[in-house]
Image (cartoon, rainbow, N blue to C red):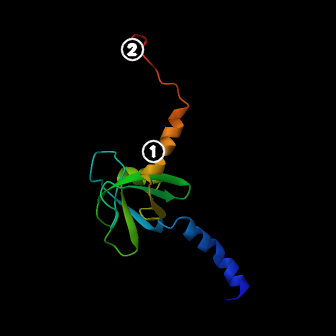
Amino acid sequence: MPIAKWCAALPLLMLSSASANAESGLASFYPGVGKKGEMTCAHRSHPFGKKLRVSHGKISIECRVNDRGPFIRGRIIDVSTSAARALGMIDAGIVQVMVEAVDEEKRAVKDANHTAGQEIPVAENSL
C-alpha cells in the first residue's frame, strides 16, 4: 500500500479503534413509545433498558432502548421525538449519527467522584 493511502486511512483506523463498540449510520425519529417527553430509542440488537449515547454533530444525548428497529436499510437507530428535538434533527428527519453504549460502571464512578467533594447536609438533631 502506498504511504499516501496509508496515511489517509490512519485517522479512520484510529477513530474505529478508539470506540470499538460505537457504530455510525443514519438515524430517524418516530412518535415516542413510552412516557411523554422521555428520550427513548429503537435499536436492533441492544437490550431493552440499555442506555445509548447518540451524537449528531456537536450534540450528544442519552436515550433508553425500549423498542426494536429500525427496519429500513441503512438506518441504525430510531429515536423518539423528544430525543430528535434534543439532537436538532426534527427539520432534517434523517441524520448521520454515532451510537455507543453508555458504560454504567464508569458513569457510577464519575457520579461518585462528582459528589465526593460536596458537603452532605446533616440535621442537627440527628447527632
Say which of 40 and 1 sits in front: 1
Question: Number of numbered discs present?
Answer: 2
Expressed as whole percent of the image width and height from the top left, the position of residue 41 reads 35, 57
Judged left or right of residue 8, residue 15 is left
- Name the disc covering residue 1, or none: none
Q: Among all residues in the image, which is located at the extreme bottom?
A: 1
Q: To which quarter of the image does residue 27 belong?
A: bottom left
Which residue is found at the position 39% from the left and 10% from the top?
125
Expressed as whole percent of the image width and height from the top left, the position of residue 14 reads 61, 70
Task: Identify whether 122 is placed above or below 5.
Answer: above
Judged left or right of residue 58, residue 34 is left
Judged left or right of residue 123, residue 49 is left
Q: Amino acid at mark 1?
A: Ala
Q: To which quarter of the image does residue 53 belong?
A: bottom left
* Residue that badge 2 annotates: 126
* Residue that badge 1 annotates: 108
Q: Among all residues in the image, which is located at the extreme right?
A: 3
Which residue is found at the position 34% from the left and 46% from the top?
38
Q: Which quadrant: the C terminus?
A: top left
Task: Identify whether 65 is placed above or below 2.
Answer: above
Expressed as whole percent of the image width and height from the top left, the position of residue 112 reads 49, 39
Q: Label 1: state its secondary structure.
A: helix
* C-alpha gap between disc 2 and disc 1: 28 Å
Task: Identify whether 12 is placed above or below 113.
Answer: below
Which residue is found at the position 56% from the left and 55% from the top?
58
